[in-house]
Image (cartoon, rainbow, N blue to C red):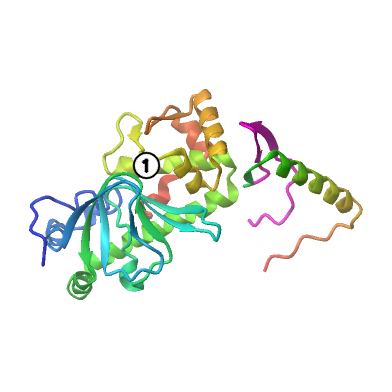
Amino acid sequence: MAKLEPETVAGKAIADSGVVLLDGPGGVAVAMTPDAARETGRQLIDAAEVADRQPLDPAPEPA
Amino acid sequence: MRADTTERVTSKFLRGRGRHRLSDEELAFLDRTVERVRDLPARHTLVRTGDRVRTSTLLLDGFMCRYMDDHAGYRQLVAIHVPGDFVDLHAFPMERLDHDIATLSPARIAFWTHETLEEIVETQPHVTRMLWFSTLLDASIHREWIFRMGRLDAEGRIAHFMCELKVRLEMVGLVEQDRFLLPLKQADVAEACGLTGVHVNRVLRSLRERDLMTFRAGQVTIVNWKQLSALGQFDPAYLRGGL
């Protein structure tokens, strides 16, 4: 079954050895510097606020 | 010139995954047609992307990898090979590879020339079929690696990676009481799993603290196979090609 819906469970971010590790959602697994993590966080929050105001598009139909 | 060797260089080839389908005569034939056996140091590049390749390599001892570098020079491992694996059999029809091949540890390898493989194709259809089968087993491992990278989080990726290596090494008799040697650095694990070294270090620590596995001084100990394989969503069926 293709996963066509967005993730509904948040990823987990932790700090380790001066680096921010993001695990999930899904197959996301990335390490970032604190600055990159801060900027990513800001962009995520900004995008979430815009997405809140957008109408939901129906999920694309399987080919 | 054919190598005159009394060692059974093919002793680990397809062990646990179809070797029983090769007759003693066919295995002896493969042994007789080895061109050369060679020892390589660790971290030695054998083939570079785009090289014209005229031989195919069976790994007899040690670990090897295939990898691709991105434009910034960061490496992604696309395969790890254990004893008994043909490392570049697919180079026979392809002639040039789209990736590099290197040793991860000191390694012993055996070569067949492509001229010899051409003769095998023309005169030994069943051996040819089994060589083809071994490349398809490679392909199934590639598919699992895509799944691992695409669908599993960091813990899942490392759990899957270790479970796969355990089963592959078990097939060739290199696991003892759930322990096996794995002469890889954490950086190699990171490059195989699409993670950073920090992430790998943290996950390995977590898996150790939860009594699932340990990886210390080049040795892996699987403490809780059931939980580790569940964490990695690991099912070894793909390693046997449906056999």
Give yes or no for residue A6 being in the magenta stretch.
yes
Residue B78, horizontal then vertical, whole percent: 45, 55
In which quarter of the view is residue B220 placed? top left
Residue at 33 percent of width and 52 percent of height? B44
Location of residue A40 in the rendering, given as x and y in whole percent from the top left corner:
75, 46
Identify residue type, mark 1: Val
Q: Quadrant of residue A13?
A: top right
Specify the segment rendered in magenta: A1-26
Q: Would residue A8 be found to the left or right of residue B199 on screen?
A: right
Tell which of B69 and B223 is nearer to you.
Answer: B69
Of helix, strand and loop, which mostly describes the magenta segment? loop
Q: Quadrant of the C terminus of chain A?
A: bottom right
Bin the neighbour count of mark 1 within 10 Å (Cα to Cα): few under 14, some 14-19, many 20 and up. Answer: some
Q: Residue at x 73, y 65 (%)?
A: A61
Based on the picture, tell me whether residue A50 belongs to the magenta stretch.
no
- Residue B169 vs B239, above or below: the answer is above
Q: Nearer the viewer, residue B219 or B14?
A: B219
Read off the chain for label 1.
Answer: B
Q: Quadrant of the N terminus of chain A?
A: bottom right
Direction from residue A36 to residue B53 in the image, left or right: left
Question: Residue B133 placed where, x, y %?
Answer: 32, 62
Circle 1 sits on which residue? Answer: B167
What is the x, y in percent for residue B58? 26, 56
Query: Is B167 or A27 nearer to us in this picture?
Result: A27
Which residue of the protein is positioned furthest toward the right in this rendering? A53
